Image: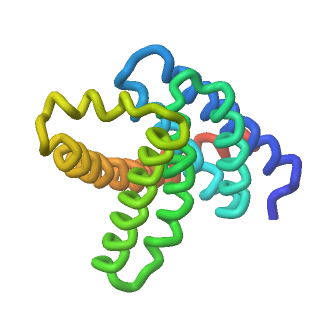
Amino acid sequence: MKKLSYKVALGGIIAALALLVMFLTGLGPFLTYLCPMTAGILLVAVVIEISKKWAFATYCAIALLSAFITPDKEAAMLFIAFFGYYPILKSILEKMKFRVLEWVCKFAVFNVSVISAYWILMNVFGMGQILDALGEWGKYGILIFILAANAVFVLYDLTISNIAITYINKLRPILIRKLK
């Protein structure tokens, strides 16, 4: 069993790194999506090293702080609504017996979360200008955006898996050796 000091230290380091990544959203428009994804992937280490519960507590801390310090509020909302907790949820969903049901659940969570996040951004925070960019694609703009987002989601899911495998097989043994 890991000591509390180890859990707090690892959670704090991951939270600080994730907040740094979220703070970078102000540097460019393409970072609105990339930074929340990257910040969420950092939680994989907490899931592997400590537990899903501790990773969720770390996510909550990052989500709360990122709501205040992230210059791009759309990115903060995407982290809070999906990318922050998904690596934790993924580890639970992948224990399902049936792969088809697993993917149906993953897509359902993704679509409900992202559509809800954008609804909140537009209707609660008055950021209706988000839809202006979709106007360039015509009347099918929202549909094209949702299809593209689902394709990116599949890549994100596969990336999390590959990073977790790389972390366990390559990075973790090096870190453990250094700590001994």
Q: How many marks?
A: 0
Give the x, y percent position of residue 112.
41, 60
Q: In the orientation shown, which residue stands out farthest toward the top?
A: 27
Q: Nearer the viewer, residue 173 or 106?
A: 106
In which quadrant is the C terminus drawn? Answer: top right
Give the x, y percent position of residue 21.
55, 27
**Relative to 172, is 138 on the left or the right?**
left
| Residue 179 visible in the displayed image | yes
**Relative to 37, is 179 on the left or the right?**
right
Residue 134: image quadrant is top left
Give the x, y percent position of residue 168.
52, 53
**Relative to 142, is 179 on the left or the right?**
right
Q: Nearer the viewer, residue 117 or 167?
A: 117
Up the image or down, 73 lies above or below 50; here it is: above
* Residue at figure coordinates x 40%, y 16% from the top left: 28
**Relative to 6, is 106 on the left or the right?**
left
* Residue at figure coordinates x 56%, y 21% from the top left: 71
Up the image or down, 149 lies above or below 105; here it is: above
Q: In the orientation shown, which residue stands out farthest toward the bottom?
A: 97
* Residue at figure coordinates x 73%, y 44% from the top left: 61
The chosen color scheme is rainbow
| Residue 178 visible in the displayed image | no
Q: Nearer the viewer, residue 39 or 60?
A: 60
In which quadrant is the N terminus drawn? Answer: bottom right
Residue 12: image quadrant is top right
